[in-house]
Image (tube, helix red, strand yellow):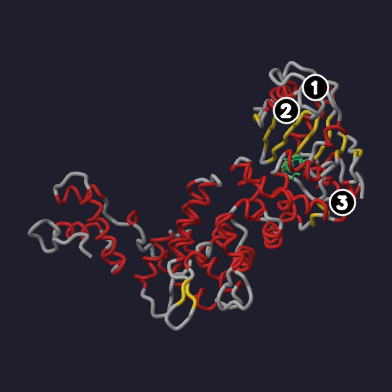
Amino acid sequence: MGSGCGGVGSGTAPTVAARAMDALLDAGYECYVVGGAARAILLGTRADDWDVATSAPPSEVRRVIEWMGMKPIDKGEAHGTVGASDGGVTVEFTTFRAEGEYSDARHPDSVTFIGDIEGDLSRRDFTVNAIAMKWPGLEVTDPFRGVEDLRRGIIRAVGDAASRFAEDALRMIRAVRFESEHGWRIEPRTRSAISRNAQRVRGISAERVRDEVSRVLVGPHAGRALADMVRLGLMDAVVPELSESGGVGAGRLSGRTLMEHAIMTADAVAPSLVLRLAALLHDVAKPRCLGVDDRGRVHFHGHDALGAEMVGEILERLRYPKVVRDRVRVLVKEHMFFYSPEATDAALRRLVGRVGEEGVFDLLELRRADVVASGGDAAPFLRQVEHRVRDILDRGQAVRGSGLAVNGEDVMEVLDIGPGPRVGQVLQRLLDMVLDDPGLNQRDKLRSIIAGMKPGGGDSRPGSS
Ligand code: ATP
Ligand code: MG
């Protein structure tokens, strides 16, 4: 292991990074490849995003990027970070951070930045992230023996773990994020500092937590990392609602808790953010819905509906965008969908209508993982549902109002009425009819059905079902 490892050299740098670093060098500044890119060079893998530490102040970095004909991206210039993006590659330049940041924080551009690479590295989170490679020769600076930890896959705080986490609690979630993405292990002292400080995570901004937690969820080692989040107390700080699942048995799933079941399900679904969130949270309401029937059997009636509500709140608190919240919520709401081979096409069309054409395949994937995590094998029935749903979609059958051959304009024109709730009621009634009989979904047929809904017409009970 070393800068020559795997034959990689400065030639592996994306053009935008290499050109900017060369230009800064010409102007008399130093540049070091750090972060994920330095790790990738050492491991002989690829990094799409590059982090560079430089002695150049942000104003100089901005000037160089503009000179290259590109638009600098403000990544928090007040903190010394300026970025550039080209062809899917992002490079972030951060001016050496010295103790106390700038000598004059109000005029970050006008000061001469003090500090050097060693000082900069000592402010970074983990030893594997505190390795620098000097541009262009890629000589390694490694004051905290990060290369050795990288080789062994060990996540170790730089300096005193507890005080580093007190400075910035997000680092604790970053530790599990690296565990999830790379399969590394957190060493014992760092672990115990996390255990003692986990609740500090509640104090940091939801957006920062969300971004790191999302990466934990979609990582290839998510199952192990999520279990670690629970053990270290981080899960309780981020999603306290899930903690209730730690003490409740998952019913017939011998000896497993609901929490263990949730994590196994998340680990078993495909690594998309929406699916992983839905899988982790699908049974979140079970502890609150726990009941016992007259024969002494445990049940969780209504946990899907309540779960969907809770998930909406949890994801809103974590500032996930509305599209993500809506998709996860509907998956949780519908995760108990019932299917038997006798189910009609109309029932399947209604299911697709509720979860959406994209959502229905996520729903099948979620159910597959849910059953697998319960020790079962759901494949045969799910394959059948998938086959039938694809068939329905291939035939272009309407599953939602937007697929109707008529719209509100038709309704208003035929019934000679203005806009109002009645228009929506009529459309809903038409959709119900079309879901039962897709052959009705033709403009002239639907318009004559609408005509029959006029007062005194053949059907005057729109929305009466
Ligand atoms: P990836 O390749 O996945 O982006 P990364 O290590 O580059 O991993 P970034 O979030 O891009 O992670 O951060 C770049 C570098 O900045 C890190 O390697 C680390 O040295 C430093 N860093 C980032 N966030 C923190 C933090 N909260 N505290 C201390 N250092 C940090
Ligand atoms: Mg990075």
Q: Name the residue under label 1.
A: 113
155 lies above or below 445: above
Query: Does residue 23 sit above or below 399 in this rendering?
Result: above
Residue 267 in sight from this viewpoint = yes
Q: Is mark 3 on a helix, strand or loop?
A: helix
The percent position of residue 314, horizontal first and vertical second, equals 52, 52
**Residue to which mark 3 is pinned:** 149
Residue at mark 2 to residue at mark 1: CA–CA distance: 10 Å
Q: In this view, does 181 lie to the left or right of 448?
A: right
Find disc 2 in the rendering and name its residue.
80
Identify which amino acid the numbered label 3 is placed on: Asp
* Residue depicted at x 47% and y 81%: 296
Q: Earlier in the sequence, mark 2 or mark 1?
A: 2
Mark 1 closeness class: few <14, some 14–19, many ≥20 residues within 10 Å: many
Q: Whole-percent x and y of residue 86?
A: 68, 36
Q: Quadrant of residue 58?
A: top right
Give the Cα separation between the discs numbered 1 and 3.
30 Å
Q: Which of 199 and 358 is in front in this view?
A: 199
First-in-chain label (2 vs 3): 2
Q: Do the CB atoms of the residues marked 2 and 1 lie less than 8 Å apart?
A: yes
Q: Quadrant of ligand 1?
A: top right
Front-most of 455 and 286? 286
Quadrant showing the C terminus? bottom left
Q: Is residue 321 left or right of residue 456?
A: right
Q: What residue type is labelled 2?
A: Gly
Image spot of residue 300 (x, y percent): 47, 71
Q: Nearer the viewer, residue 154 or 218?
A: 154
Q: Does dot 1 land on a helix, a strand or a loop?
A: loop
- Residue 283 appears at what percent x and percent y? 53, 65
**In this orientation, does residue 385 appear?**
no
Say which label, 1 or 3, has the lower sequence index. Answer: 1
